[in-house]
Image: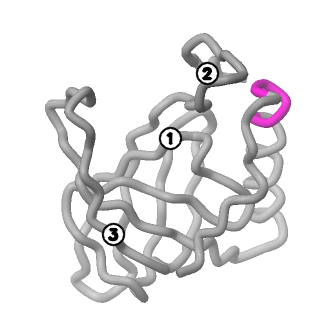
Amino acid sequence: MGTILCTEVRPSESFHLKRVLGRLDSLEPGGESYSVRLLLNDLNAQGAALFSAKPVAPGLKAKLWLPAPHEMVVAGQISWLREFEERRRVFTADPQPFRLGFIFQFGSPEEASHVRALCDELAALFPGADLTQKPFAA
């Protein structure tokens, strides 16, 4: 089992898990690849909210690859896109000003089970995180 790092958790503060860099590969012929960033508390068994340096069109079918905490590759579709203004206190050499919703489209029951198990593992490690209720549809 991989190690997930987090900041100290205080009940009155918002809860943030580790950031993971990944890749979103378009399933369209000749489609692009996008570098994406995920906060693990923006993941649930139905989808994920991602950050991207470039806009990604809603409706695009793609595969999401995440290397950690366990490698995961899952197909899905972009459900929404919003420009996100990063706060001045967020310092990064790789700004990603676009926020997008990605709805999973599982190819098998095993694939769905793998994602559910990952979410259950994260929920057990971080009881203050709500990994079940976030909507990723528009």
Q: Of label 1 and label 3, which has the lower sequence position? A: 1
Foreground mark, 2 or 1, reads 1
Majority secondary structure in the magenta region = helix
Please give the residue where the numbered disc 3 appears in the rendered image: 82
**Residue lying at 61% horizontally and 21% vertically, measured from the top left:** 4
| Label 1 to label 3: alpha-carbon separation | 16 Å
Secondary-structure class at tag 2? loop
Foreground mark, 1 or 3, reads 3
* Position in image of residue 86 (x %, y %): 26, 44
Please give the residue where the numbered disc 1 appears in the rendered image: 39
Residues marked 1 and 3 touching at CB (< 8 Å): no
Mark 1 nearby-residue class (10 Å; few <14, some 14–19, many ≥20): some
Q: Is residue 105 magenta?
A: no
Residue 4 - label: 2
Q: Quick one: 84 or 65, which is closer to the camera?
A: 84
Secondary-structure class at tag 3? strand
Q: Of label 2 and label 1, which has the lower sequence position? A: 2
Furthest residue toward top = 8
* Position in image of residue 74 (x %, y %): 58, 64
- Is 125 situated left or right of 33 in this image? right
